[in-house]
């Protein structure tokens, strides 16, 4: 990759005799002087404009910076020294402009993007002969045989998967190993759901699926009161069943739910705790195991404490809002997830998959 050079002059706004040409350097600009003249070469003018401009009220106040434009920052402001182009800022914007120039100089000094070790590698799914492990790239996960195989999705791993899908599956494996909940966000389409189901089939994980709408209530996630044989009782819903049995809760349509619905899962996502309507209390596995060392199982049952399985995970599926219609996630709830953008497959990649499914 060709390096990008930054030619700069150092000095002060009152001393013009020090403005002598300097050699091209590949180091960040030393922001200890009060005046800089920077020559930006071999770089996108549009990107440079986005770095230098201060988002003024009048958009025509700034001029697009082309290659070879000299930019000068001094006590009187920032000047663009090019034929027919010049702009000056106020003193209040000086600190922000110097910071932007400092960031720009660091990027230009080291333009090589640090890529992940798995980037550029050909990924493939490796399964061991005893079907106890699965490996994608440099991530390996131990497979546990499900208690209820009928809850494991099937039919989503057909043919050769594209490298983009394998990259997503590797990321999901990594987050599962770390015990983190994930949020798959992307444009409308089945790509996010198919990716989640393929991951569950690959790892043989039992799934609990819930589709959110604007009519979804708190009872649809926790417990619902039902009548059977003339007796009313509470019936556990998908979120509670997944937490107790150690399954993966797939929540689709996050952007459609009302704001007072999803915060019900906030404590379950953060602390693995939830107070149920029938008086039981779900607590994290490590806390339950510590209590079990001090109390017997019968005593914990009398206290109506229920252990949340350590394999419980949540995969949320949603659309970015905006630009699509819906409610954005609240910041406290959004911080509980590890996000991943899943783009739709193009025709060149999706057509062979469709042929494989049809045939």
Image: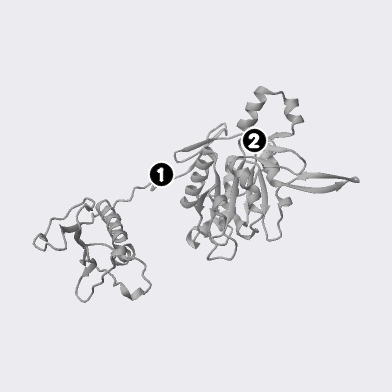
Q: Quadrant of residue 18?
A: bottom left
- Rounded to the nearest whole Å, what is the CA distance between mark 1 and mark 2? 31 Å
SS at circle 2: loop
Vertical order, 171 against 187 (above or below): above
Q: Is residue 154 left or right of residue 64?
A: right
Query: Looking at the image, which is closer to me, 123 or 103?
Result: 103
The label nearer to you, 1 versus 2, is 2
State the mark number for residue 297: none
User: Nearest the camera: 330 or 171?
Assistant: 330
**Among numbered discs 1 and 2, the one appearing first in the sequence:** 1
Closer to the camera, 197 or 264?
264
Residue that mark 2 sits on:
309
Residue underneath mark 1 = 118
- Quadrant (top left/top right/bottom left/bottom right) for the C terminus: bottom right
Q: Please name the residue shown 64% across and 28% down the image.
A: 289
In this rendering, would 180 be left or right of 72?
right
Q: Quadrant of residue 190?
A: bottom right
154 relative position to 103: left or right: right
In the rendered image of this protein, does residue 294 appear above or below residue 351?
A: above
Q: Position of residue 39 (x, y in %)?
A: 19, 62
């Amino acid at each position: 990759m060709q390096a990008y050079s930054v030619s700069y002059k150092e000095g002060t706004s009152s001393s013009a005799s020090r403005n002598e040409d300097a050699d091209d350097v590949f180091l960040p600009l030393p922001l200890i002087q009060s005046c800089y003249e920077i020559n930006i070469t071999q770089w996108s003018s549009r990107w440079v404009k986005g770095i230098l401009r201060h988002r003024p009220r009048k958009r025509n106040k700034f001029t697009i910076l082309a290659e070879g434009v000299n930019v000068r920052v001094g006590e009187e402001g920032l000047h663009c020294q090019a034929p027919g182009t010049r702009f000056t800022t106020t003193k209040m914007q000086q600190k922000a402009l110097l910071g932007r120039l400092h960031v720009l100089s660091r990027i230009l000094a080291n333009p090589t993007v640090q890529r992940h070790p798995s980037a550029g590698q050909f990924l493939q799914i490796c399964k061991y002969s005893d079907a106890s492990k699965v490996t994608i790239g440099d991530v390996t996960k131990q497979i546990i045989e499900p208690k209820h195989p009928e809850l494991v999705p099937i039919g989503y791993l057909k043919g050769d998967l594209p490298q983009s899908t394998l990259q997503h599956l590797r990321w999901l494996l990594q987050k599962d190993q770390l015990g983190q909940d994930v949020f798959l966000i992307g444009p409308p389409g089945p790509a996010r759901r198919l990716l989640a189901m393929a991951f569950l089939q690959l790892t043989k994980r039992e799934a609990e699926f819930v589709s959110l709408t604007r009519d979804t209530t708190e009872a649809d996630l926790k417990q619902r009161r039902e009548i059977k044989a003339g007796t009313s009782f509470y019936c556990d819903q998908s979120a509670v069943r997944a937490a107790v049995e150690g399954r993966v809760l797939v929540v689709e349509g996050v952007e459609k739910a009302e704001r007072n619905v999803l915060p019900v899962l906030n404590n379950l996502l953060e602390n693995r705790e939830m107070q149920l309507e029938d008086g039981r209390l779900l607590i994290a596995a490590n806390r339950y195991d510590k209590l079990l060392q001090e109390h017997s199982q019968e005593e914990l049952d009398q206290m109506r404490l229920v252990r949340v399985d350590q394999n419980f995970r949540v995969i949320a599926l949603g659309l970015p809002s905006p630009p699509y219609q819906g409610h954005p996630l609240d910041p406290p709830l959004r911080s509980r997830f590890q996000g991943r953008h899943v783009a739709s497959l193009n025709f060149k990649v999706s057509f062979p998959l469709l042929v494989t499914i049809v045939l």
